Amino acid sequence: MNPRPLEFLPSLARLATVAVFCALCAATNGAENLPREGMALRLSADQGVEIRDGRVVGRRDRSATHHIAEVPAGFAGPSVDATQSALHFTHKTLPSINLQVLPADAREITILGVGQVDEIETDVCVVGAGSAGIGAAVAAARRGARVVLIEREARLGGTGTNAYVANWEPGPGCSLAEEIYLRMKADGGAGVATGYPVQTKAPMGYILVTDGFPYEATLRRAGIPGSEYRRVPYKPEAFDRVVRDMLDETGKVTLLDRTTFFQAETNPEKTRVESVLAEASGGRLIRIRAKVFIDSTGCVWLCRALGCEVMLGVDPRSRFDEPSAPEQGSLQLNAISRCYLIRPNKTREHEPAPEADVRFPKCAFVTGWKDGLQAVNPMPMLPGRALIDHGYDECLRCSEQMARAHWHWLQQIPEFQGYELAEIAPMLGIRESYRVVTRYVLNENDLLAGLPGQKHDDIIAVADHPCDIHGAGGQLSEVKTAYGIPYRCLLPAGSWSNLLVACRGAGFSKIAASSCRLQRTMLQIGHAAGIAAAMASQRNVPVDRIEVRALVEDLDARSRYPY
């Protein structure tokens, strides 16, 4: 996952590459119009300033625009104001930008995004290390491609490990998913689980790891009774550790965690992504140049930065002719959860009742280990469009109050009285946001046709989860059998020659996305995107000109659902 959904951008992202702002500017007739006392060159980061013996000897923007702030010979250099990240000029100084003298009436200039930019060249750049990003990076590297993987969070795994949706629902998976499972299980970090009764009348799923069930029992949902559903709970730290090992073992992946993508750079024709800019946690700026880029950010930040056409909310029936779609579209989004972890505590301490009247859904989906770590998903906690109406930080604040109130309620149920709150997820559990318009958009008609009725010859992943919309307008509509996801759903519409999208924001209608957004499905499309990117980079061809038949045969996705 990279930049926070919908409204969050780091400070540098709001600045473009480099922006220059002149306050109170006026025309100038030349160098004789000296600026007055108080001129300041303000920097957005503590970089780009070279200091020797306490004196500023240079300051340079090293981004693509290469602005240079200089003091001409014979004038005094500026002093450093560390408290404001500024260089203060006196009346004896004359700063200039790219040899253009500033207007005489200018009082302040701000150079944004100043700093040394480190350059990395690679074959494939994957932005976002959620399930799809992990699948893409591992698959591309194992095919011999050099990979740079960018991830904003400290822990890899997206919503599974950071929003604590630490459970794989029943349904098909690829070989990478099985490998991750087996590695986690060997370390006690995952297992196959089944449902248990709970002493409450509230809607409740209680799914605990149980010996005796094989992994293969988790690979199907459609057409079997709920009592036979088998899921895979896992520990977030186990997933993070395993996938880091898998990435490291390739010897081909440069992992940039705690690093936030904020800008894309293209060729003049806007047909090719040339590079992306990212900011590390310490303020270090990095430009990654690659042959192929994969957007796995969940909220498709890379595609949106490039101006790709996107969809948001309910699709009108006229868009895809879906039988269940309404005549008119709307900005209705799948609901948001704030999950939390609980652990055994013999003291039986209880979460205090909330001081204020906090409303929350009195239902839960709990997965994990009996007498061990368990993840609690309160299900629909906030309406999906709360992100748009209130912003990410406010949603985070409100949902924490709701999570604590929810745990206070859950502790009254006998099965949870010996537990304590371990940690509230640091990330919101977001099910839906922007979706990219791609060469083909998977829709409800594909889900209804299923693999037997689909005519696509480029299927690279399969799924059989129901259409599952939480919150207002919610529904749970089972599919009769598995359906396929075409490779074209990973190709943004337009003329981009080296861009793929592999995440919940790929080419899916809202209805289709509510089914195929699950983690193992995302691993599948990431797996496919990674191999496709490696093929394109190694053969120097556009991503839509690879040998798609070879990709399909290599993945053999249809065989993942032999029922």
Image: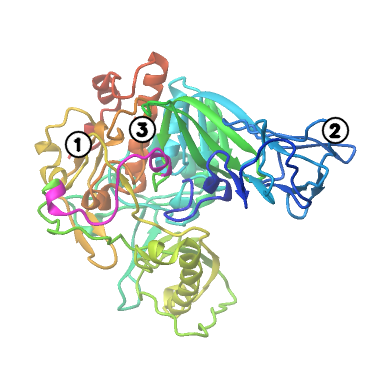
Q: Quadrant of the C terminus?
A: top left
Spatial distance from mark 1 to mark 3, Cα to Cα? 28 Å
Q: Amino acid at mark 2?
A: Gly
Find residue 74 and name its label: 2
Mark 1: few/some/many CA within 10 Å (<14, 14-19, 20+) = few
Spatial distance from mark 1 to mark 2, Cα to Cα? 80 Å
Residue 93 visible in the shown view: yes
| Residue identified by numbered label 1 | 562
Q: Earlier in the sequence, mark 3 or mark 2?
A: 2
Residue 242 visible in the shown view: no
Q: Quadrant of residue 165?
A: bottom left
Q: Secondary structure at mark 1?
A: loop
Q: Please, is residue 501 above or below residue 153 in the view?
A: above
Q: Earlier in the sequence, mark 1 or mark 3?
A: 3
Q: Please, is residue 363 above or below residue 331 in the view?
A: below
Q: Secondary structure at mark 2?
A: loop
Would residue 394 be counted in the magenta stretch? no
| Residue identified by numbered label 3 | 500
Q: Position of residue 277 (x, y in %)?
A: 54, 36
Spatial distance from mark 3 to mark 2, Cα to Cα? 53 Å
Q: Position of residue 488 (x, y in %)?
A: 25, 32
Q: Position of residue 308 (x, y in %)?
A: 34, 39
Q: Residue at x 45, y 56 (%)?
A: 7
- Read off the magenta span: 301-319
Q: Earlier in the sequence, mark 1 or mark 2?
A: 2
Comparing labels 3 and 2, the label whose residue is closer to the camera: 2
